[in-house]
Image (cartoon, rainbow, N blue to C red):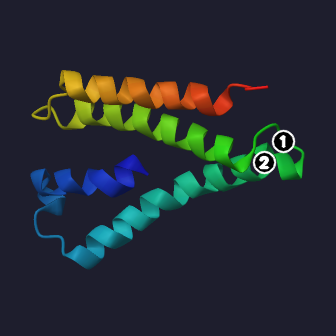
């Protein structure tokens, strides 16, 4: 989803993307997102505790957000070289990792 949501911000740097209208950008983004949905939906289906999987709905969403954050960080560093991650971003990401711990910890 990162590529679908933010990749279009780089389209204008390519000869094929200089004159794309918003509708074309949306359709390209939907096309990219379609392939992620082909993996994400079955993973949620199989991973959900109500379907015999090991995870609750909240845990599934937490996993998805943590993975999205890691992918976004890598995407930003790779494709948006002018964007810099500061200490505050790293602290924020660390707090999100702490949130994952809190959600998955058994607090009996």
Give residue 29's quadrant in the image.
bottom left
Question: Dividing the image into 4 quarters, which one contains the C terminus?
Answer: top right
Mark 2, Cα crowd under 10 Å, few <14 / some 14-19 / many 20+, is some
Where does residue 24 sit, x and y in percent of width and height?
Answer: 28, 73
Q: Identify which residue is drawn at 47% across, 58% down.
A: 33
- As drawn, 93 above or below 6: above
Q: Nearer the viewer, residue 92 or 83?
A: 92
Q: Earlier in the sequence, mark 1 or mark 2?
A: 2
- As drawn, 45 above or below 28: above
Relative side of 95 to 64, left or right: left
In what element is the residue under mark 2?
Answer: loop
Give residue 18's quadrant in the image.
bottom left
Relative side of 34 to 58, left or right: left
Q: Nearer the viewer, residue 75 or 67?
A: 67
Where does residue 49 sit, x and y in percent of width and height?
Answer: 83, 46
The residue furthest right is 52
In space, the residues marked 1 and 2 are separated at their CA atoms by 5 Å
Q: Which mark is residue 48?
A: 2
Q: Which mark is residue 53?
A: 1
Q: In the rendered structure, are the residues bearing label 1 and label 2 in contact, judged by CB atoms less than 8 Å apart?
A: yes
Where does residue 92 sit, x and y in percent of width and height?
Answer: 33, 30
Relative side of 81 to 36, left or right: left
Q: Identify which residue is drawn at 43% across, 66% down.
A: 30
Q: Identify which residue is drawn at 41% across, 36% down.
A: 69
Where does residue 67 sit, x and y in percent of width and height?
Answer: 50, 35
């Amino acid at each position: 989803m990162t590529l679908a949501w933010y990749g279009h911000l780089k389209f204008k740097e390519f000869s094929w993307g200089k004159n794309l209208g918003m509708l074309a950008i949306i359709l390209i983004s939907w096309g990219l997102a379609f392939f992620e949905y082909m993996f994400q939906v079955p993973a949620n289906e199989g991973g959900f505790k109500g379907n015999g999987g090991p995870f609750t709905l909240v845990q599934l969403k937490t996993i998805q957000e943590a993975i999205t954050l890691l992918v976004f960080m890598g995407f930003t560093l790779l494709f948006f070289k002018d964007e810099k991650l500061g200490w505050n971003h790293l602290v924020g990401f660390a707090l999100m990792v702490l949130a994952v711990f809190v959600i998955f910890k058994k607090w009996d």
